[in-house]
Image: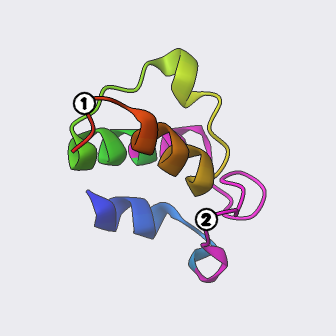
C-alpha cells in the first residue's frame, strides 16, 4: 500500500513532515484517500472522513496518530 501512495505522489522529492498534500505533493482527492487508508492499516486506527478531510500534511497525521488511544 505504501508503494501505491508513493507512486501517486508526483513530487516525491518534496516529501517532508510539513509538505502540504495538495500544494507541495500534488496529491488529488483519490491520493488523499489512499494515504488515509495506508495510515489506518499501518497504525490500526480508524480515521473518520470528517477528520481525514482536515489533514493537509504528514505533521497533522503524525499528531493525530500520536494522540490516538488505539494507535499501534
Q: Which residue is most to the bottom?
A: 13
Counting from the top left corner in percent of width and height, residue 11 is at: 64, 74
The C terminus lies in which quarter of the figure? top left
Q: Does residue 20 appear left or right of residue 47 in this picture?
A: right
Query: Image point 65% across, 53% down: which residue?
Result: 21
User: What residue is shown with label 1?
Assistant: 70
Q: Is residue 21 above or below residue 8?
A: above
Range of magenta residues: 13-34
- Alpha-carbon span between mark 1 and mark 2: 22 Å
Crowd around label 2: few <14 · some 14–19 · many ≥20 (10 Å): few
Counting from the top left corner in percent of width and height, residue 67 is at: 44, 36
User: What residue is shown with label 2?
Assistant: 17
Q: Quadrant of residue 66?
A: top left
Type of secondary structure dominating the magenta stretch: loop
Q: Nearer the viewer, residue 72 or 55?
A: 72
Q: Nearer the viewer, residue 41 or 8?
A: 41
Q: Does residue 1 appear left or right of residue 66 in this picture?
A: left
Query: Image point 38% across, 32% down: which residue?
Result: 68
Q: Nearer the viewer, residue 52 or 71?
A: 71
Counting from the top left corner in percent of width and height, residue 29 is at: 59, 38
Counting from the top left corner in percent of width and height, residue 52 is at: 53, 29
Asked if residue 48 is among those painted magenta in the image, a careful observer would answer no
Query: Image point 55% across, 16% down: which residue?
Result: 50
Q: Is residue 8 above or below residue 54?
A: below
Q: Quadrant of residue 20?
A: bottom right
Amino acid at each position: 500500500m505504501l508503494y501505491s501512495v508513493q507512486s501517486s505522489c508526483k513530487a516525491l522529492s518534496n516529501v517532508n513532515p510539513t509538505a502540504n498534500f495538495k500544494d507541495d505533493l500534488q496529491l488529488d482527492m483519490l491520493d488523499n484517500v489512499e494515504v488515509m487508508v495506508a495510515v489506518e492499516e499501518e497504525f490500526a486506527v480508524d480515521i473518520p472522513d470528517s477528520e481525514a478531510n482536515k489533514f493537509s500534511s504528514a505533521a497533522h497525521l503524525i499528531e493525530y496518530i500520536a494522540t490516538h488511544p488505539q494507535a499501534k
